[in-house]
Image (cartoon, rainbow, N blue to C red):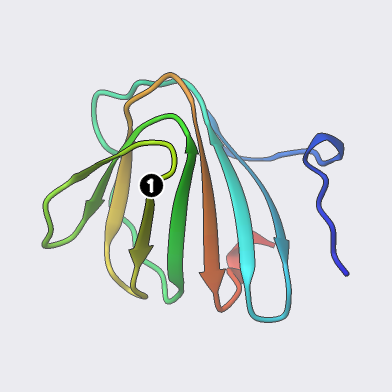
Amino acid sequence: MEVMKYAETEPIRVAPGVNRRFVHTERLMTVIVDLTEGPKSVPDPFHSHPHDQTTYVASGEVLFFMEGESPEHLHPGDLVAIPANKPHAIQLLSETARLIDNFTPLREDFF
């Protein structure tokens, strides 16, 4: 059994204001993404990956963008599903936010 205790885990700094922690099995990865330095005046750049993804907004507010769709203002408790290879992005609307991302297959690039 793999256990990640938040308070006992050092975050991985991905970019200024973006830290993550994660736990995984052979086929599924759950990532806690802590965002700071908001609100942002523009969205992050669009990106895509060959993984199915769900994102749960645990705290804060983000504007979620997916190619070909209208932006969605997401609040705590909201959940979004992103198909593999679909370009998407977020814009941090609050000072901070915590997103819980799930990926399958594993994001090998996170290791």
Q: Is residue 70 visible?
A: yes
Asked if 22 appears above or below 24 in the picture, the reply is above
Q: Where is residue 16 in the image (x, y as percent from the top left)?
A: 52, 29
Locate residue 50: give its quadrant. bottom left
Location of residue 82 in the rendering, given as x and y in whole percent from the top left corner = 34, 66
What element does badge 1 sit on? loop
Q: Does residue 108 appear to the left or right of 63 in the view shown? A: right
Q: Dividing the image into 4 quarters, which one contains the N terminus?
A: bottom right
Q: Position of residue 28 (x, y in %)?
A: 63, 74
Q: Quadrant of residue 77?
A: top left
Residue 7 higher or lower than 24, as above or below: above
Q: Which residue is labeled 1 in the image?
A: 78
If the image is split into quadrants, where does the C terminus sit? Answer: bottom right
Q: Please name whichever residue, 10 or 77, is drawn nearer the observer in this view of the structure.
A: 77
**Taking the image as drawn, is residue 16 in sight?**
no
Instruction: Residue at 23%, 50% (x, y): give it.
Output: 65
Total marks shown come to 1
**Toward the viewer: 38 or 4?**
4
How crowded is the residue under tag 1: few (<14 C-alpha within 10 Å), some, or many (20+)? some
Residue at image point 44% right, 66% down: 53
Identified at 35% across, 21% down, the residue is 39
Please name whichever residue, 111 or 74, is drawn nearer the observer in this view of the structure.
74
Q: Which amino acid does label 1 sit on?
A: Asp
Measuring 32% from the left and 24% from the top, which residue is drawn there? 40
**Side of 65 relative to 36 (left or right):** left
